[in-house]
Image: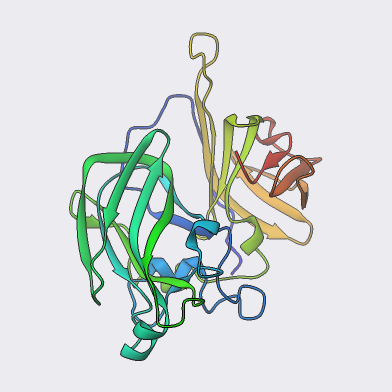
Amino acid sequence: MRPRALLGTVLLLALPAVAGGVGYAQATGYFKKDTRPTLYQPLNLLDARDATAWCSTSSDPLNDLLTFGFTAPTKIDEVRIVTGNNFSEATWAEFARASKLVFIAGKQREAIELKDERGLQSFTFGKPITTTRLTLEVRDQYPAEDPDQPVCITDVVFLSEGKPLNGAWLTNGLKYDKNVHGLMGTWFAGYEGGPDRFLALHYDGTYRYSYEPYDTKKAQPKVVEGRWDVQGARLVFELGGKKYAPKFSKDPDTKATGYVLTLDGDVPDELKGPFRSTP
């Protein structure tokens, strides 16, 4: 996949909540990540197909964190879950099944408990979550006969006012691409543990940069949106009709677990400076 760069936009005011598309799904780990990277990857959660599933690295799902990104601030008021590996009765029995999930966005948390059964289970949040980034923790499981088997989830469908935000139509649009996979997701800048700048790169070739200052009396929020591409060792951004092609590097973070994305050279002022893969 090679997204085409198009005109970017600069927004100086905070955007209202809309139903943005799903831009990415990430996991800190998953089963057979190194040997078969597409088999149990987190993008499988978004396609509403029983043929694909995400499975945790080990039998302890607390070691893995799932993150979903949206291309615009999005109000989510319902989720539909298919727990376990629902490809067949055999895979359903072979793997453990998630039984308790917690969705987290900022200070808001929504916990749900799943039945140990195949098929869709629907849950309405007590209070809608409005966000561009949502994390998911698997807190408990229904174990498989083999206690060492990983925990699986087949689908997570997000809804906003009754409208599904993801489904089978995303199968191609969010297809795994090893050349850009490591760049997908939200990157953070600012104070460690309290970032105020966010750069999200989405599988559909769009990006969203936001500056969210703590003191809005001294500084104004800012949003930059547009399209991006990868050309060799350069990330190509389009902003205001001009293309920027900074060199980029992705290196291990020496201060924390994760990586640092550094943009050097020809880069918009809004995107200058290194970005971390963890807040």
Q: Is residue 2 above or below residue 235?
A: below
Its colouring scheme is: rainbow
Figure quadrant of the N terminus: bottom right
Q: Whole-percent x and y of residue 44?
A: 44, 71
Q: Is residue 190 left or right of residue 86?
A: right
**Residue 106 located left or right of residue 34:** left
Q: Position of residue 209 (x, y in %)?
A: 55, 38
Residue found at x 76% / y 54%: 234
The quarter holding residue 266 reads top right
Residue 261 in the image: above or below residue 163 = above
Q: In the image, what residue occupies the spot 76% across and 39% down? A: 255
Residue in front for this viewpoint, 268 or 113:
113
Count of numbered labels shown in the rendering? 0
Q: Position of residue 277 (x, y in %)?
A: 64, 46
Question: Horizontal placement of 11 versus 253: left or right?
Answer: left
**275 and 232: which is toward the camera:** 275
Above or below 4: residue 240 = above
Residue 211 position (above or below residue 275): above
Question: Which residue is farthest top?
Answer: 217
Q: Is residue 243 visible?
A: yes
User: Along the line of sight, which residue is nearer the eye, 227 or 257?
Assistant: 257
Q: Assign the C terminus to one quadrant of the image.
A: top right
Is residue 166 shown to the viewer in this render?
Answer: no
Q: Name the spot of residue 161 as percent of width and height, x first.
A: 19, 48
